[in-house]
Image: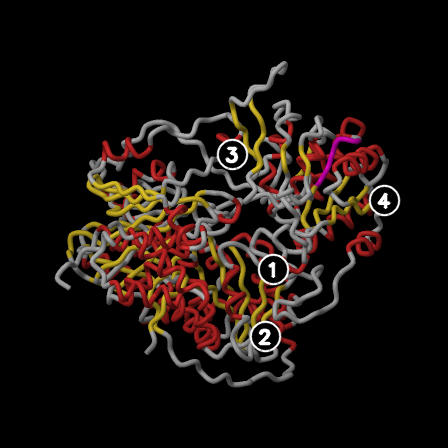
Amino acid sequence: MIDSKVHSILFVGVGGQGIIRASDITCEVMMEAGFDVKKSEVHGMAQRGGCVNSDVRYGPKVYSPLAAAGSGEILISFEKMEALRYLKFISKDASIILNTEEIYPPAVNMGAAQYPDDVIGFLENHYEKVIAVDAVSIAQKAGNVKAANVVLLGTLSSLMDIQHSIWESVIRKSFPQKLVKLNLEAFQMGIPA
Amino acid sequence: MKKVLMSGNEAIARGVYEAGVRFAAAYPGTPSTEIMEQFARYDGVYAEWAPNEKVAVEVAIGAALGGARALAVMKHVGVNVAADPIFTVSYTGIAGALVIISADDPSMHSSQNEQDNRNYAKFAKIPMLEPADPQEAKEYVKLAFALSEQFDTPVFLRSTTRVSHSKSVVVLNEPQIPENKTTLAHNAEKYVMVPINARTRRVEVEKRQKALLSFAETFPENKIEINNPEVGIITAGMPYNYAKDVFPDFSYLKLGMVYPLPEKMIRKFASQVKKIYVVEELDPYLEEQIKALGIQVTGKDIFPYTNEFDPGIIKNAIHSNLHNAVSPYKESLAHRPPNLCPGCPHRALFFALKKSKAYVHGDIGCYTLSYLKPLEGLHSCICMGASIGMAHGMSKALKEKGKGKIVGVIGDSTFLHSGITSLLNMAYNQSDALIIILDNSTTAMTGMQEHPGTGYTLMGKETKKVNLTVLVSALGIENIRVINPYNIEETQIAIKEELARSGPSVIISQSPCILFKRANRKPVPPAEIDLDKCEGCKVCLTLNCPSISWKEGITKENSKRKGVAFVDETYCVGCGLCAQVCKFDAISYGKRKHQ
């Protein structure tokens, strides 16, 4: 490993979307791939519909589990508008993976606020690489909407130089036997053609 | 050596186990809860949820006086509850070993304040270790037990949310085989803190302080790293990692022991570097003590007093000319405040309670979330157990002006934690407030922990279950009513009648947490909205149920309606509250759809 840099991936979204599980899997993968790795996460309110975010940082030696604002290299947003909330934390040349699922915040539900228009267009105007994925539909095709988080990991894997077999073995370890096949398929389907 | 990814809390539990410790007591509280949950899973351990942190510490002291090596775990504000025994066990010392874990919450991710519990170490004259990540957390808790045994003292281990809830690579060690040193040995002069003995022990504390001070000078986890001698950073815990992330080339004095401080080592470091920054979250705890040594340092002049740090905050404070990172998106985004779950019994209770227009003293639990719009269910919330005393005090002060208008709400776990004595006071001194115990049969906010009212222990054993009605009655409360909050109309009537009464009343609002597995609820089909009947009045939206939303633009002939309510079937659990509040009979529930 010549690269001494610490890399940061930001996982963001809404409680209940499997974000923590996805960032855990990514950490395991980076550890298996021989990197030092640290991650942060916010607990407690996740089940109750709040915002959830988790930084995953890897490199030859990682000190901080939190990335400095403006330094994230990949933003993986499990909900469409949530990507906008965390742009301060990524660099100008960051890549963005965007699940197109919309989950309305209470104020939007109540008709008191608007859900932002054309999130994808805005992101494409400001960032070079934006990959929009309909992870829910893909997961449905794979057999279960709950695998949307693993679909997004498939997409993430396409931006990282990590052996496919490592992702596969960690996914195998991360789910009960009867869900392994479904999740491996979801992962594969998330990799852009 | 096996390497695994672990959270700080998992690593602490592992470290305690590796140290051969088999006894622990705690009360759950974010960010500390998982330590006990993990520890309880190891073979051959005894772990218990105590009703509160004071009891947990006393249980651990008792075990330690019997020669056991004991652990007590709590969140930062829990140490306030347990402070009484802690300050005096510092005098007595222990026969076995005693480690108290304080998990602090800078930024108040899940707390009512962000007090800096390093101050407790200095205040109570108890040594404190502070790890910076999960690997250190595992090692430091072992060191803490060794220190406790060596110096006959309780030892604090301080974690913070970022240490407890971050994950990193941890190397597992072979667990030490526990040695049973428990024994019934009398030593009344050491353990009976009447003034004559306490005065003797007080002197022992100062002797111990001296010994600890020289220990700190050679403690291997107090580390000097000399790199660039121009700038030195003195820090401890997680902020060390933030600083190293952005300033890998500066020199460091990283303190693994934050009380007492190694005076000579600090002087030595100061002589080796030109400019010193003290990097610490919250209070200028290290800064003040270092300045008192006559050493010039920069600290809270440039670093914030409030909230947790991150690498960017440290970089920007030291390089004051840097531009802060900004988002290109300038519009405001709708927040996602945490909300009560779909089907939560608290939603029903607070919807009914709001109609009474009472002043509601709140407490700590999921129901604190009812403060938010549109339920706006609380008008005060200070700490665990405070609602009852506050409702009583307000009622006494306001006399006739407050009659029928003052309520205190408190969860079952919180009531058993520190509400019982306040209710006893209320019965004793007789005020007119109404107390509502929100009994959801679990400690829901921290993730379903058992308590004395659940009938099960932390180890999963069936046990005695306190009967709240009998308990409340025994305290001297005569007006007690048990209700099912899901019936909104009956709940409103009960609240109205109890508020009208003279003297204290208690309503026990009984319904298990919707996420509570043992309640064995049968699945109910989701609510359905009849679009012909919905008038778009939005009253169901005032329940703030995550599964009900508003769809603009669906109009109907001869009606002013501008839109309709909409139920998201994937979230709805069919609790039926929306059907009860709908005035147009447009919502039905509990019926299977005709296919």
Is residue B406 one of those drawn in magenta? yes
For marks 1 and 2, give the CA distance. 16 Å
Rounded to the nearest angstrom, the CA distance separating label 4 from label 2 is 40 Å
Q: Are marks 4 and 3 in contact (CB under 8 Å)?
A: no
Q: Nearer the viewer, residue A112 or B133?
A: A112
| Image quarter of residue B344 | top right
Q: Which residue is mark 3?
A: A106
Q: Are marks 4 and 2 on the same chain?
A: yes
Q: Is residue B546 visible?
A: no
Measured along the vertical axis of the image, is residue B352 above or below residue B465? Answer: above
Residue type for callout 4: Asn
Is residue A99 inside the magenta stretch?
no
What label sits on residue B479 in the rendered view?
4
Q: Residue at 61% across / 23% down in the picture?
A: B536
Q: Which residue is mark 2?
A: B46
**For the residue labelled by badge 3, is the local secondary structure a helix, a strand or a loop?**
helix
Magenta segment:
B404-408
What number is the disc on residue A26? Answer: none
The chain ID associated with circle 4 is: B
**Cα separation between marks 3 and 1:** 29 Å
- Element assignment for label 2: strand
- Determine which quarter of the picture holds residue B186: bottom right
